[in-house]
Amino acid sequence: MDKEQQRTLELLTEIEKDAGLTQNDLAVRMGVAVGLTNLLMKRVVKKGYVKISKLRGRKVRYLLTPKGISEKSRLAYEFLRYSFQYYRYMREDFRKSLEPHLQSGKKRVVFYGSGETAELAYLSAKELGFSVVQVIDEEPNGSHVADIKVEDVETLRNDDCDFVLITDAERVKDRCDRLMNMGFSKERVAVVNGV
């Protein structure tokens, strides 16, 4: 599923939830610029997915057409299919990244990164018999990965684990460098292949 299809699905979903939204409201909810929202709106209207109904003054109401409802359902199905494929791919990638450590007897791992990727890594690590002893990040904000509270990176001690797995694609090199500066050797820092 490409980015345009994802945005179309998101737009149709938001319109279905509340037909009285302005393009400004839609832009905020979707996290995109108003200009992009306007462009997307023109496309879905031209394709017959949305009908614009004029109210008083400049106020309009967006209505999903039967064709729009059908397209939203199709896109939702495609998104789910894509998500499951991505999920399977990432789980396999984690297994490939973790297995060499397991074969060498290293079972205590710390995750560096706390996003959705870390949640998938957690499931793979547990399946393989690893003990996830800590999850660290720059700004933990009281979040959790599974049942583990995310802690500040500064709480990590060199002897707390056998190795650290970087589970976030952002700033991988910076994170590796930071771990090296904290005394971790390259052999004790792993990066997921897909990250």
Image (cartoon, helix red, strand yellow):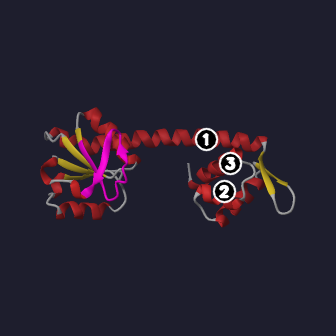
Q: Can you identify the residue that label 3 sits on?
A: 12
Q: Residue at x 66, y 51 (%)?
A: 11
The part of the chain drawn in magenta is 133-153
Position of 177 relative to 93 (above/below): below
Of the residues shown, which amino acid type is indicated by label 2? Leu
Q: Position of residue 58 (x, y in %)?
A: 83, 63
User: Residue 26's mark?
Assistant: 2
Q: Position of residue 151 (x, y in %)?
A: 28, 51
52 or 140, nearer to the observer:
140
Q: Residue at x 70, y 49 (%)?
A: 15
Of the residues shown, which amino acid type is indicated by label 3? Leu
Which mark is first along the chain, 2 or 3?
3
From the viewer's perspective, tell me whether residue 49 is left or right of residue 147: right
From the viewer's perspective, tell me whether residue 157 is left or right of residue 171: left
Q: Can you identify the residue that label 1 sits on?
A: 76
Q: Which mark's residue is nearer the viewer, 1 or 3?
A: 3
User: Residue 51's mark?
Assistant: none
What is the secondary structure assignment of the residue under circle 1? helix
- Cα separation, mark 3 vs mark 2, equals 10 Å
